[in-house]
Each structure stands twice: as C-alpha cells, then as structure tokens.
Image: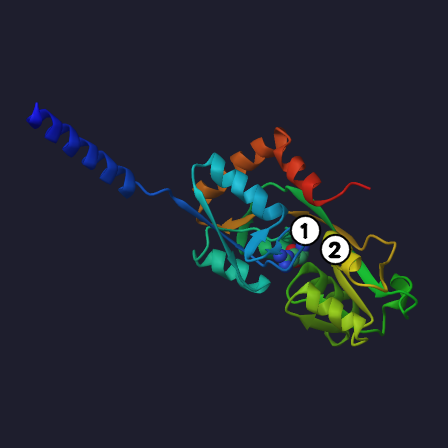
Amino acid sequence: MKKLLALALAALMLFALAACGEKTPVLTMATNAEFPPYEYYEGDKVVGIDAEVAALIAEKLGMELEIVDVAFDSIIPGVQAGKYDMGMAGMTVTEDRLTKVSFSSSYATGVQSVIVKEGGAVKSLDDISGKKIGVQTSTTGDIYASDEFGEDAVVKYDNGAVAVQSLILGKVDCVIIDNEPAKSYVAVNEGLEILDTEYAVEDYAICFSKENTELKDKVDAALKELIADGSVQKVVDKYINAD
Ligand code: ARG
C-alpha cells in the first residue's frame, strides 16, 4: 500500500513538473501606446482596440500576448528584424510599407483629420499652405503633409499628444492625425476642433516580417473569424461611441 502511494506521488510530481515546463508560446506585439482609442495607457497597462483585439487573437491561438511599447517608427524595423512577432498600432497599409513587411487583412478604417484651434488661422484645407503643420513622425499624416506642403512646413513630434500640445501653444497651426485619436485629443483639450473634411481614408492592419508567413496566416485566420463573429465590432463599440 505504501509503495503504491509513493508511486502515485512520484507520478503526480512528474506530471506537475511537466505541466510547469510546458510553456505557453508568447505572441509579442509592438505598438506605440500614444494613440487613443487604439492603444494608450490606463495606469501601467496598455489598453485600447488594438490591445483587446490582439488579446482575442492570442487567446484563439493558445498564445500569451505580450505588448511592447516602442516609438512608432521602430515598429516596422523591429518586426523586420524579428524582434517582435507583429506590429499593431492603428497602422495604415501603404505601398511603401508593403515593400518592407506583410499585412493581415484590414480590421479598421482610419481617416486623416486636421485638428485646428477654434477661431484660428486654418479654417479649411485651403488655408494650410504656408502654415506650420504638426504630425507624429513617420505616420501617414507626416508622409502626406511632407509630400503636399513640403518638409519645411512640417514639424515632427514623438507622438500625437505632444503635437496637440504644440498646437495649443501656437507653435503649429494645425495637426494632421487619424480621426479617432483626433477626436480623443479634442475631447480632452479645450478650444480645439476638427476640420469638416476627410483628408485621406486608409486601412489599418497588423504587420509581420515577410519571412514569417506561418504566423501571419494563423493570425489572419483568427482575425477573420473575430471579424465574422462580431467580436472585433464589439471591441470597437466599447471604445468608440457611435454618434
Ligand atoms: N495610421 C497612421 C499610420 O499608420 C498613424 C498610426 C499611429 N499609431 C500609433 N500607435 N501611434 O501612419
């Protein structure tokens, strides 16, 4: 009887050991958590649409999501180098980025918007020429503004929040940034408004190293399921009030 008990105990211990050793695979997602409502901090936790959709994807794949917050222009190089498994940051699919990374299917649409000071010098798109434009470095807002109005007109900031602070201080005359972050910034800062114009419409997607087609396909399949069953929409509705 004692022998049997000892044997059972040994088996149990072995089992427990095996369970400990069996690690859940980690899915690292690089983002730039200065982009509400897609990614931002709540305390010391990164929350937002991208964070929650990525968590649902990881759950579907039996992986553990790890979010890494880096500068926006470090995401693609880091993904290319294999430092992160994927990049998810309200990132627009562009021709140029497609030469560097591959993208999942699109899970959201973004619109480039122009934030101005109420009663300020910029009242419509026609007024922007000759003015100073604030952007977040390397975003599509930066790329469009630099192309259209020239590098000299564009002031590049680390993130949208800092660009908006500069607008408030009068260092720039407008800020070109995606519509949902624009709404978030305007909501928490007095005296700002968004021009009634859609500057450019874009698709957001998750980026991967071109070599890692296996992960891309897995994530893409999970994402498609989450879009089809309404889970993505549920997350979007939680963060964006339809009005
Ligand atoms: N959609 C724009 C782009 O791809 C801005 C994205 C900025 N995202 C961020 N998490 N800061 O360039």
Q: Tag 1's secondary structure?
A: loop
The residue at 75%/65% (across/down) is: 145
Q: Answer above or below: position of 103 versus 148.
A: above
Return the x and y of residue 239 as percentages of the image width and height. Answer: 69, 45
Looking at the image, which is closer to me, 167 or 238? 238
The residue at 50%/61% (across/down) is: 77
Label 2: which residue?
184
- Quadrant housing residue 54: top right
The amino acid on which the numbered mark 1 sits, given as a three-letter code, is: Pro
Does the CB distance between marks 1 and 2 fall below 8 Å? Answer: yes
Quadrant of ligand 1 in image: bottom right
Q: Ligand 1 near label 2 (Cβ, under 8 Å)? A: no
The residue at 59%/62% (across/down) is: 72
Q: Answer above or below: position of 110 versus 127.
A: above
Q: Answer above or below: position of 78 versus 202.
A: below
Q: Which mark is residue 23?
A: none
Name the quadrant of the C terminus. top right
Label 1: which residue?
37
Q: Is residue 119 left or right of residue 52?
A: right
Q: Residue furthest front?
A: 2
Q: Tag 2's secondary structure?
A: helix
